[in-house]
Structure formats: C-alpha cells, structure tokens
Amino acid sequence: MVFTLGSFVLVTVAVAFVSWLKTKGTDETSKDGYFLGGRSLSGLVIFGSLMMTNLSAEQLVGRNGQGYAAGMTAMGWETMCPIALTLMALFFIPKYFKLGISTIPEFLEAALTAQPASLYRSFSLSLIL
C-alpha cells in the first residue's frame, strides 16, 4: 500500500514538474495559454493526454466488472477508441487549430451560429453549478 501511494505521488510530481518546465514561458492569461499550454506541447504529449483522459475510474473499475459479467464483449467499445483518438490527433485537431478553434463552444460558433454555442455554454455551466 505504501509503495502504491508513494509511486502515485512520485509520478504525479514528475508529471507536474515536466509540465511546468514545458509551459513556464507561456502566457496563461490568454485562451491559447490556458487551454493549449501556449501551443508549446509536442504531439506526443497531446496524444498521451488524450489517451490518459480516456482512461478514467470508469475504465479501471467499471469495464473490469462488465468484462467479468459479460465476457470480452465489454472490450468491443474500447478497441475503437485508440483508432478514433489517433485520427482526431492526426487529422481533425490540426484543422481546428488552424481555424483558431480550441473549445467546443468555438467549434459550434464556427460550424453553426452563436446561439447554439451560447446554449451549450449555459447548459455546461448549469451542470457544473
């Protein structure tokens, strides 16, 4: 138990330190600085962030239980995820960045109009509050 907690703390501190080193010269008061680390992170870091975001407590607990109850069929949903994330990282995200889009409301504004983006913002804030 002590080793597990110690290794968790060590890895967390290491990730925080490397992230700080990579982004210490960025202006985090701007949109790009806050959401994208001042565009100073490499593709490998962004890909790792996407993959680790996909691995949550639901994955580590829920999918194991579902796999025990239903067999390998539970894995079917997750086998496509790395493929989809790779396609997103290689093809879609560079196009969005060229258009200056870094958030979902900005995407909705560019694809539709300002009204759906405002509705999305309001809905998201109501869920948070």
Image (cartoon, grey):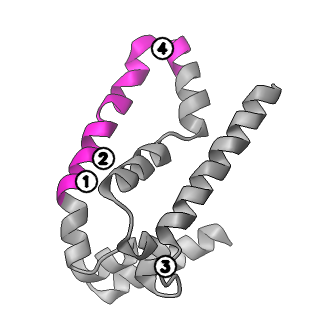
Region rendered in magenta: 66-91
- Are the residues tagged 2 and 1 within 8 Å (C-beta)? yes
**Mark 1 / mark 3, whichever is N-terminal:** 3
Callout 4, which amino acid?
A: Ala
Q: Amino acid at mark 3?
A: Gly
Give the residue drawn at x 41%, y 44%.
51
Which mark is first along the chain, 3 or 4? 3
Label 4 and label 1: CA atoms lie apart by 30 Å
Q: Nearer the viewer, mark 1 or mark 3?
A: 3
Between marks 2 and 4 in the image, the one whose residue lies nearer the viewer: 2
- Report if residue 112 is visible in the image: no
The disc at residue 85 is: 2
Question: Can you tell which of label 3 and label 2 is closer to the viewer?
Answer: 3
According to the picture, the residue beneath numbered tag 3 turns out to be 25
| Label 2 SS | helix
Q: Which residue is mark 4?
A: 70
Instruction: Tell which tag, 4 or 1, sits nearer the viewer.
Output: 1
The percent coordinates of residue 60 (x first, y second) are: 57, 30
Q: CA distance from mark 2 to mark 1?
A: 5 Å
Between the residue at mark 2 and the residue at mark 4, the CA separation in whole angstroms equals 26 Å
Residue that appears at 53% across and 65% down: 21
Magenta span: chief secondary structure: helix
**Quarter occupied by the N terminus:** top right
The residue at which mark 1 appears reads as 88
Callout 3 crowding tier (Cα within 10 Å): few <14, some 14–19, many ≥20: few
